[in-house]
Amino acid sequence: MRFLGAILMLMALLAGSPLSGQGVADAYVRSGDARFQQMAYALAVEDYATAAELGAVNEHVTKRLAECHMRLGNTEEAERWYAIVVKFLNREPKDMYHYAEALKSNGKYNEAEEWMDRYLATLPPEGGPRRSNISSFANKFNEQQDRFTVSSVSVNTPFSDFGTAWCGPDKVIFASARNETVGIQRRAAWNDQPFLDLFIAERSRTGDLLNAREVEGGVNSKLHEGPATCSVDGSTLYFTRNNFFKGKVSKSKTGINRLGIYKARGVAGEWDDVDRFLYNNSECSVGHPALSQDGRWLFFVSDMPGGIGGSDIYVCRDLGGQWSEPENLGPAINTPYDELTPFVGADGTLYFSSNGHPGLGGLDVFAAPRNEDGGFSVAVNVGSPVNSPKDEISFILDKEGRTGYFSSDRPGGKGGDDIYSFVMHYPLEQRFLCTGVVIDDEDEEPVIQVDVTLYDDAGNVVATTTTDAKGQYSFGVKKNREYKVVARMKGRFDGEQHLSTEGIEREQIIARDIHLVPDAGVWLRGTVRLKDQLGFIQDMIISVVNLSSFYSEQTRTGPGGDFSFRLQPNEEFEVLMEKPGFYSMSVPVSTIGVRQGIIDLNQARELAFERVQVGVPNSLRFVSWSPGAGKDLDPIARTELDGLVERLKVNPALKVEVAVHSDARGDAEKDRLSTQKRAEVVADYLKSKGVPKDRLVAKGYGNSRLLNHCVPGVQCSEEEHLVNRRVEWTVLDVVQ
């Protein structure tokens, strides 16, 4: 990441004199450590390399060499050193993460996925094993190569050129390290390139950038400048600079000269009257300003305390001449890693770069459309060829939404970071995938050329495919849907997995591996789901008890609510399904007369589960009394209560109230007494069926809890009175 250091936490460090006269490895290590702490990575890497040549190829030196090379954008060298780091016996999980990132930045997606999955396996389990899906993301982001046409521009040099911003429709401001005229004293210790200044270039009819020249006025200083943003009318320039104002450098307590935002006024082609941004702080970096088209919103990047992690994007609102306090854009945009170089398009879409969202490697460009409430949708990776395994930043788009520029350190440029123009031929769209591996359970190996079918929730075929050379399949899916994926192989029972795409915007890819078992014996399977809403239930405990031997097995449902067991033939079983916060369920299963096949529990019972809601009444629709009626329960009412009995027996921790209510047409006290007696009738029936009395409360409320306007003296229809004349049961407590 050659420019990440140059635009995130730039320092006014000058190149120091090389270590001399010591000639021993530990001296070079000490020198490298000092320079590393000062973020002088170009100098530190030289010291560490010398130490390694002298024999200090230990864990500390190799890690520092890997990290320095990664920060300098030398990803091939970083990969080489991280490959050594991960072989140490006391390696840390984050070493595997960094190695995977280096591999990914070099386009080695399969290897990167292997090491990232090893890293994820070290994290605390949250809903089962995790998978990085790096290869699937790479395939997804490389699919629509024809969306963009990308070209290099003429103003590029062998030094870093990046950070484009519009300055009117025909000019572009950018940052460049090309200015060597001031001599060696102005070379950055971070990457040993000349300090950055702001330049302006003219935009040709073909989109090329020509005639680059320094921005005139008091913007450029002896330290770093860039990136910047210009108001639409061209009167105001906000730009990034090391904290340097009126000849004075501000440093943090640790001696780091961090970034700040500055404002300049434009008059007759010159930018002067420089002033500081209200929220600059010497202890953290504030930079990468981006004005909205109407000038009312100022977006910027900062690593200030209280963020989500790394550098986050913030926004300030114009309060009539003064900016509001910064607001973090939240987890839809920001990640625990770095978000950089925001830009707001004419339609309000926020474009930015990130190495925390799924991408092709390094920093990728993302787009987040603006919502009606002023927030932003989950970001969309703009894909290749804008993005690559290397770093891409500073994406800007014209008002028509068709042409623009971005910067990248990809191979094939003139050197360092280069500016590229692009033409976008059709709009961006978010695409979602379901992917996975089909595995033969006999040898636990992926199987190729297996038929896989995607079904919708109505059982219709959506798409079919076959597994590839790695046993993988992939389908495009739509958000807020439910699907079933089925794999078929000769000599194996069909394997299936379910998925819900609710909330898929964040993950973008859902992984479902499918296991195929030999078509012998008896297998029980099922899928548990939420009742009356989208989605399946993960981590529900499924217990199967053999009613003859009382031998039991237990498993947990996967992310799609799926479970399976192998059962003995000619036996009776009880299947118990339970998860805290949900009503449990028990279902009998018999394999009498069954020697081979699949028993699908969903065909015997609707495995849809409700959440336990304490204090929320549940209606007993068929347990009711008319005015003046007796207190006997009819057969339909008893059948409904039998269902409640079963629920209470399977959920022994519940304490419930049975409540009977009347309408407002009778005497209040008489109604209270009659409803109390009827509530006791219901409770007595439940007790007679085996529900412990200490778990039941019978309560007659009479007409004290009316649900509508039909109070005493008000004329209402029979249907309106019926709303109030009801029988309910309510969970009072869940006894642990």
Image (cartoon, grey):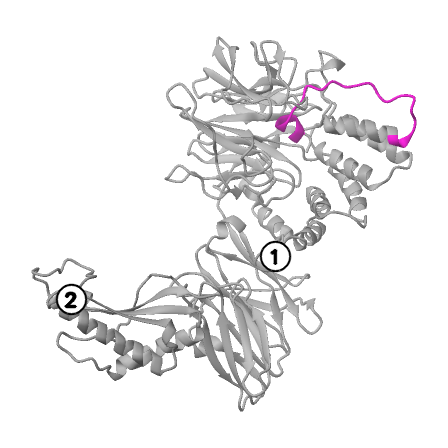
Q: Tag 2: residue type? A: Asp
Element type at marker 1? Answer: loop
Q: In this view, does 204 lie above or below 379?
A: above
Question: The magenta stretch spans which residues?
Answer: 3-26
* Residue 421 seen in the current view: no
Query: How far apart are labels 2 and 1 at the CA level?
Result: 53 Å
Which residue is depicted at the point 53% across and 90% down?
A: 592
Determine which residue is flagged by label 1.
Answer: 125
Element type at marker 2? Answer: loop
* Location of residue 201 in the rendering, given as x and y in whole percent from the top left corner: 57, 19
Identify the image quadrant of residue 494.
Answer: bottom right
| Picture disc at residue 594 | none
* Location of residue 49 in the rendering, given as x and y in whole percent from the top left corner: 84, 32
Closer to the observer: label 2 or label 1?
A: 2
* Residue 441 seen in the current view: yes
Camera-side residue of 217 and 490: 217
Determine which residue is flagged by label 2.
Answer: 663
Characterize the local packing of mark 2: few (<14), some (14-19) or many (20 or more) Cα atoms within 10 angstroms. Answer: many
* Location of residue 580 in the rendering, given as x and y in whole percent from the top left corner: 48, 64
Q: Tag 1: residue type? A: Pro
Which residue is depicted at the point 65% across and 21% down?
A: 257
Characterize the local packing of mark 1: few (<14), some (14-19) or many (20 or more) Cα atoms within 10 angstroms. Answer: few
Magenta stretch: helix, strand or loop mostly: loop
Horizontal side, residue 568 vs residue 661: left or right:
right
